[in-house]
Amino acid sequence: MKTLVLGLGNPILSDDGVGLQVVRQLKDRFDKPDLGFVESSTAGLDLLDLIAGYDKLIIIDAIKTEGGEAGQIYKLSLEELRPTYHLASPHDINLATALELGRRLGMALPQEIVIFAIEVADVTTFGEKCTPIIETAITKAVRLVAKELSEH
Amino acid sequence: MKKITIDPFTRLEGHGRIDIFLDDAGEVANAYLRVPELRGFEKFCEGRPVEELPRITPRICGVCPGAHHMASTKAVDAVFHVDPPPAAKKIRELFYCAHMCHSHIAHFYALAAPDFVVGPTADPAQRNILGVVAKVGVAAGLEVIKHRAYAQQIQEVIGGKATHPVCGLPGGVSKAITEAERQDFEGKAKSLVEFAKFSLKLFNDVVLSNKQYIDLILGDTYYMTSYYMGMVDANNKVNFYDGDIRVVDPQGKEFVRFKAADYLNVIAEHTEPWSYLKFPFLKKVGWKGLVDGTDSGVYRVAPLARLNVAEGMATPLAQAEYEKMYSTFGGKPVHHTLAQHWARLIELQYAAERLLELCQDKEVTNPNVRTIPTATPTEGVGVVEAPRGTLYHHYWTDERGIVQKVNLIVATGNNNAAMCISVKRVAQSLIKAGKAVSEGLLNMIEMAYRAYDPCIACATHSLPGQMPLEVVIYNSQGREVDRLSQYTS
């Protein structure tokens, strides 16, 4: 089974880069031929190019929820993200729509998708480091994803 | 009417919010587009070597990084007072035409087409790229994906990376194009020219032949007059990569023509306490508020503006479409905001033709792609036409080339005032005596918003359950009477 671990985020907007940081720490711990690690700062249609050809996709990204506590980590399925097929951005399509589009066009997309989302604090200040609580969460997230990779 | 103070420090969710204020009679008095603030960009850049900015600034946005990279690279050329060799300029322009193709294809099929191909009053669950593919067929859908990918692949080879290019250097680019690469690009460019024709035909068959859509495009709801700004070559034809910047007045007459370095003589920025995004306006005309017309310094950028400013397109197929558009509207300039989508496809045609021209230019494989700077760095401005409009990068450095100060006017920033006016106009036509607040209203406002293809302070994360735009309506006492957002959980 070919698995892709995909870290998403903006590396210069503080906590927004948390997904990238997690992948960076993970990739040194694993060296398997059908396991890939990618850091990406893109979304929507561009993601289809990255994920085609894999059986399982693990996404790691920042999240902001109402009432969420910074540092909390959620393991979500695509359905739990309550995606809609409407636009999630003024200039791109969201993950659910991109995946559905790929499927309808016959692209070979992952059958299994797991999302690790880290509740963040600051995504509007320019900076290359995460805030302290999130730095701690990175370590925890690395452990959780590593567990997912070795157990499945 | 009660005076309301809008606190700009209110946390905004999603990408933007529109606040609509009603007067005592329940009519729309004002509409304001508010955006989240990103803090500390200047501080983040200060102290860095200026040649790093072409790699940093593309990360402001995950959608038009190519535009930021090019504007930044040109600004760095200017800081170092260096002129790149011709092959480097052609390579940059070739890359950049691929970027325009990539961006315009994505915008039309994912964002504009759903309203027109599926229909503005159709069920929102259908009004997206999936609905478009259902209507045009899987084969056509695959062509969209394929051609977007062609444009992306050209960018990746020249730029050095997918999405965030790194090829721009002071005085040139990091590597030359090989003959094998040139041939590969040429094949893709030819296919893109054909795909642009297909897209224009689709627009013609689906949109221009449909009276309901024509009425929407030509109606008052989406009409506003303004000045227009865009980059043109020596013959006053649209050029995305280089040239002078030209402004025409609402009657289409040239108002001013200037070089990138002189932009501060032409543009000033107005601030409002309720918005982090400033409002650029034409200094000579002055800031008269959020109003349109000849006496207001509000101007617009992006595809429709570029075509209004220019005297034609530099390539034949695009020129024919340009003439068709203006004869359909009965003259220039065209003020109908929804015509942006048509203009965008005409630009796609030009970008593909120009891409092919550059691929077939023998000089593009010349190995001399860099002039090493020798002058002491000081200050420089770089301007390109981003997919969303004129983009200005201005850097100041010390004598070692370390950044002291940065000023950017992003493409969408130029359109800030016009977007507010457009949104207000839509709201005014659909809210009367405090009534008719419905999901249809929200989509009509979104259509105005989408026509501008705004790129406002984007991070690249997705906020599940949130929508990109929320509309809040206040009565004349400042009390919230309705809040519209699609698909909240």
Image (cartoon, coloured by chain):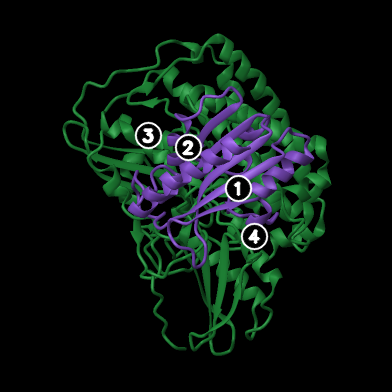
Chain colours: A purple, B green
Image coords of residue A106 (percent x, y): 78, 35
Q: Is any atom of residue B354 visible in this view?
A: no
Residue under the image location 65 percent in, 39 percent down: B105
Asked if marks 1 and 4 fall on the same chain, the answer is no
Q: Nearer the viewer, residue B269 or B101?
A: B101
Three-letter code, disc 3 = Pro
Q: Which mark is residue B54?
A: 3
Query: On what subunit does the disc labeled 1 rest?
Result: A
The residues tagged by marks 4 and 2 sit, at their Cα atoms, a distance apart of 38 Å
Q: Which mark is residue B447?
A: 4
Q: Kindly indicate whether the residue at mark 2 contacts the one at mark 4 (C-beta within 8 angstroms).
A: no
Image coords of residue B147 (percent x, y): 68, 31
Q: Which mark is residue A92?
A: 1
Dot 2 or dot 1: first in sequence order is 2
Q: Nearer the viewer, mark 1 or mark 4?
A: 1
Residue on which the image places disc 2: A23
Q: Nearer the viewer, residue B220 or B67?
A: B67
